Image (cartoon, rainbow, N blue to C red):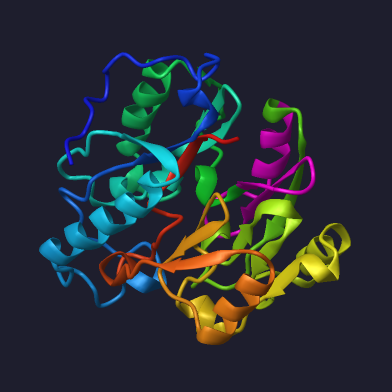
């Protein structure tokens, strides 16, 4: 699949065309993907152990699944930035506003100007964000599909004050959720808002106050809590696509529960990216939603 050049002219997200009514999802080819450092527990003992050909095959498979329901945009991968493939961390997008990530890990900071250039070239308004305030984009900030709110994880990568800072920019209620398990270092590794107000999540990844906040807003019949085995499969790191749900893996029991709630699980194995602590959601960023 040929990547668009980062500065290729593109229509503004505001343009009212048939094409713009589709979801638009940003991905980045794994041309330079590998595990070269350790910034999360999944990367431990995995340096140099990814299989490039298998990673490319798995990425292309996910891209094909996403393309069935959405327009895929590609950002040009940069040599020396192996985690750029995880475009969920490019930033947070809501309408025409984009907030570029401020990475906590110094290894990923060179990605920031590249993603900023991408958003600017696509006509987004890039909001200002404090240089010294860690915030890792749509890895930690997720739009609810039933209420007019944004959930924002903090405590691992994004700062505790990030939810309040984001709320000032997006003019929408932002609810902070404290992450307490290093294995689930981004919100999207353990929490997935689904269409119709449903929520797929792993409760032990959060502190008691955060679990209470989740339960206050999401009614019990809409909460799909998963066990540790499915959490470790990154079942929550899924991409909602017009009723289907692209995901690395899920137990038969979880797949049955999802189908009962009206969702169609589509298993897209992503073993090579799991070695770096990412799966389907990490590899995508929704630029335009319905």
Query: In the displayed structure, would residue 91 be above or below residue 154?
Result: above
Query: In the displayed structure, would residue 204 be above or below residue 107?
Result: below
Query: In the displayed structure, would residue 181 be above or below residue 168?
Result: below
Pick the residue in front: 262 or 274.
Answer: 262
In the image, 199: left or right of 67? right
The residue positioned farthest toward the right in the image shown:
216
The answer to whether residue 188 shows anywhere in this view is yes
The residue that appears at 41% across and 15% down in the rendered structure is: 11
Quadrant in the picture for the C terminus: top right
Please state the horizontal and vertical placement of residue 254, each as a whole percent of the image. Answer: 58, 80
Quadrant in the picture for the N terminus: top left
The image quadrant of residue 87 is: top left
The magenta segment: 142-168
The residue that appears at 65% across and 56% down in the rendered structure is: 194
Please state the horizontal and vertical placement of residue 30, each as a whole percent of the image. Answer: 21, 51
Please state the horizontal and vertical placement of residue 173, each as a whole percent of the image. Answer: 79, 39
The image quadrant of residue 42 is: bottom left
Pick the residue in front: 86 or 247.
Answer: 247
The image quadrant of residue 44 is: bottom left
Asked whether 35 falls inside the magenta stretch, the response is no
The residue that appears at 68% across and 27% down in the rendered structure is: 169
């Amino acid at each position: 699949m040929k990547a668009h050049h980062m500065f290729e002219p593109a229509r503004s997200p505001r343009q009212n065309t048939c094409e713009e009514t589709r979801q638009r999802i940003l991905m980045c080819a794994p041309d330079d993907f590998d595990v070269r450092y350790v910034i999360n527990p999944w990367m431990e003992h995995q340096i140099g152990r990814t299989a490039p050909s298998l990673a490319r095959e798995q990425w292309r498979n996910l891209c094909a699944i996403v393309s069935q329901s959405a327009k895929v945009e590609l950002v040009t991968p940069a040599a020396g930035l192996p985690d750029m493939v995880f475009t969920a961390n490019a930033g947070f997008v809501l309408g025409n506003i984009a907030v570029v990530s401020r990475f906590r890990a110094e290894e990923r900071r060179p990605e920031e100007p590249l993603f900023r250039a991408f958003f600017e070239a696509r006509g987004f308004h890039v909001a200002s964000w404090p240089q010294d305030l860690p915030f890792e984009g749509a890895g930690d900030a997720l739009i609810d599909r039933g209420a007019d709110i944004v959930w924002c994880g903090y405590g691992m990568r994004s700062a505790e004050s990030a939810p309040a800072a984001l709320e000032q920019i997006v003019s929408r209620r932002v609810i902070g959720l404290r992450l307490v398990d290093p294995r689930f270092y981004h919100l999207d590794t353990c929490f997935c808002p689904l269409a119709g107000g449903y929520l797929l999540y792993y409760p032990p990844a959060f502190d008691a106050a955060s679990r209470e906040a989740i339960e206050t807003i999401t009614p019990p019949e809409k909460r799909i809590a998963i066990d540790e085995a499915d959490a470790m499969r990154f079942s929550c790191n899924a991409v909602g696509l017009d009723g289907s749900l692209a995901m690395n893996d899920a137990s038969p029991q979880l797949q049955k529960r999802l189908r009962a709630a009206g969702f169609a699980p589509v298993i897209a194995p992503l073993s090579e990216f799991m070695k770096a602590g990412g799966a389907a959601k990490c590899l995508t960023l929704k630029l335009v939603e319905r």
